[in-house]
């Protein structure tokens, strides 16, 4: 099976991938361990890795196949520095989509340091960025042959042998070269302006150079979209990725928390995903994504699972329909996720959606952890209320998700 577990505690995301050969990869991180705990306590990714390690005869020899940082936003890099530190020497590949040169990375840190005086970011965010950049640099030295930049190396991973009779590959779908060049030049210009004028602009957006990964195994495909935006030109953002993603994609981790600016309708229609997974940013409060109308639009074509219920005003929830509380009856009948239900109802760090695919593209396992839930379009929600059987509520036009 090709399996993914997407943690989304209400701000950001962290993804654990289990490839069909049993190896494990990590994409992004959304939480630091509590108090920098050496055992990773409080970081759901580290806790899950420790559970995977216990399956091995020698837990201390547990290896991570790859660690990937899609872009340098705090809700995606928190925890990665500590993870790279804890597993140093046991990570086979490291991939990132920060700016191309050390000069640009230094400029990013300096720019963030300058903005702190104006209220953002705080010291923890800045120190976390410095830590993850330093750790990626160390990892590059430890495994130089396994280091790749998402904007330069489209073919990140191809198995040297067929896994259970099928080709396994991981490709980079972004960022585009033109976006990397523009973002790097913009960042250096912003820093120069700040030094000369004494004022700080905060317009630089790392989402412009977010990475995105396409996983393929046989007829199965999963798109982990990061925060990649739609783009403004024919060779930018998702508009360039359209030329690369030509296959049916069963599962999509929706780009930039399902914001309007990250949605490419032409690409979405082409992929025709069965399951869309959304991780809210700051619980969708205020103007933060996802917005109800975007979830409604996605729910018209795909089953939509949300890792943490957005905190929308009740009047805004009506277009989305009812939450399927009955999905809570799902049991962890597989090894995708151990039992990770939080003991504290207010603790969202283990909110997650886990799903598995077979090589024919069938969704074989589907599990919701913590407060994760499924949202339906209004007509489907009404039908579900009339007939509360969960399986029957899945639209006939879609491949039903397994119980």
Image (cartoon, rainbow, N blue to C red):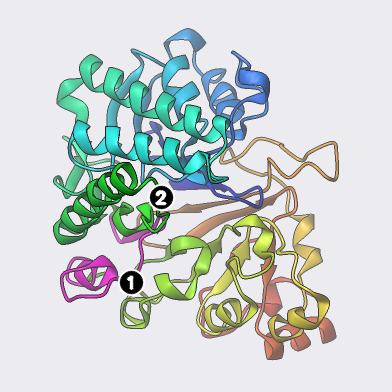
Provide the residue span drawn in magenta.
218-245
Q: Position of residue 25 (x, y in %)?
A: 39, 35
Q: Residue at x 69, y 64 (%)?
A: 285
- Would you identify the image quadrant in which residue 286 lies? bottom right
Quick one: 298 or 176, which is closer to the camera? 176
Q: Nearer the viewer, mark 1 or mark 2?
A: 2
- Would you identify the image quadrant in which residue 19 lies? top left
Q: Position of residue 68 (x, y in %)?
A: 35, 38
- Would you identify the image quadrant in which residue 144 lies? top left
Q: Residue at x 60, y 21 (%)?
A: 40
Q: Is residue 27 visible?
A: no
Label 2 sits on residue:
199
Check the image and report above or below for 225 versus 163: below
Q: Position of residue 118 (x, y in %)?
A: 53, 46
Q: Which SS class for mark 2?
A: loop
Label 1, residues with CA under 10 Å away: few <14, some 14-19, many ≥20: many
In 3D space, how far apart are the residues under numbered discs 1 and 2 (Cα atoms)? Answer: 30 Å
The verdict on residue 238 being magenta is yes
User: Quadrant of the image for the C terminus?
Assistant: bottom right
Q: What kind of secondary structure does the magenta stretch mostly adopt?
A: loop
Q: Position of residue 364 (x, y in %)?
A: 52, 56
Q: Is residue 71 visible?
A: yes
Quick one: 232 or 176, which is closer to the camera? 232
Label 1 sits on residue:
230
């Amino acid at each position: 099976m090709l399996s993914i577990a997407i943690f989304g505690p209400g701000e950001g995301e962290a993804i654990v991938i289990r490839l069909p050969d049993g190896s494990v990869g990590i994409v992004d991180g959304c939480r630091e361990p509590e108090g920098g705990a050496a055992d990773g306590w409080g970081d759901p990714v580290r806790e899950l890795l420790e559970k995977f390690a216990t399956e091995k005869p020698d837990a201390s020899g547990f290896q991570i196949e790859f660690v990937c940082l899609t872009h340098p936003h705090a809700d995606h890099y928190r925890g990665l520095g500590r993870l790279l530190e804890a597993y140093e020497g046991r990570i086979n590949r490291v991939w990132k989509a920060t700016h191309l040169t050390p000069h640009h990375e230094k400029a990013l840190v300096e720019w963030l340091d300058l903005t702190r005086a104006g209220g953002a970011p705080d010291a923890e965010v800045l120190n976390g960025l410095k830590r993850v950049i330093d750790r990626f640099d160390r990892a590059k030295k430890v495994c130089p042959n396994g280091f790749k930049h998402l904007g330069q190396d489209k073919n990140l991973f191809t198995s040297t042998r067929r896994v259970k009779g099928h080709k396994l590959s991981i490709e980079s779908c972004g960022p585009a070269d033109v976006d990397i060049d523009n973002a790097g030049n913009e960042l250096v210009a912003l820093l120069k302006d700040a030094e000369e004028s004494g004022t700080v602009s905060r317009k630089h957006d790392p989402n412009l150079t977010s990475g995105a990964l396409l996983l393929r195994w046989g007829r199965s495909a999963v798109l982990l979209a990061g925060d990649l935006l739609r783009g403004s030109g024919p060779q930018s953002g998702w508009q360039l990725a359209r030329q690369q993603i030509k296959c049916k994609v069963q599962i999509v981790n929706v780009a930039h928390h399902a914001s309007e600016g990250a949605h490419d309708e032409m690409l979405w229609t082409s992929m025709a995903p069965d399951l869309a997974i959304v991780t809210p940013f700051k619980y969708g409060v205020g103007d933060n994504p996802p917005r109800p109308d975007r979830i409604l639009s996605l729910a018209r074509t795909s089953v939509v699972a949300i890792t943490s219920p957005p905190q929308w005003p009740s009047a805004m929830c009506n277009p989305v329909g009812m939450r399927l509380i009955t999905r809570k009856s799902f049991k962890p009948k597989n090894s995708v996720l151990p039992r990770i239900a939080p003991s504290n109802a207010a603790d969202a760090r283990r909110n997650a959606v886990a799903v598995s695919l077979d090589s024919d593209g069938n969704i074989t396992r589907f599990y919701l952890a913590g407060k994760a839930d499924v949202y339906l379009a209004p007509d489907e929600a009404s039908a579900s209320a009339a007939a509360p059987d969960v399986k029957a509520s899945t639209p006939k036009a879609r491949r039903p998700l397994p119980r």
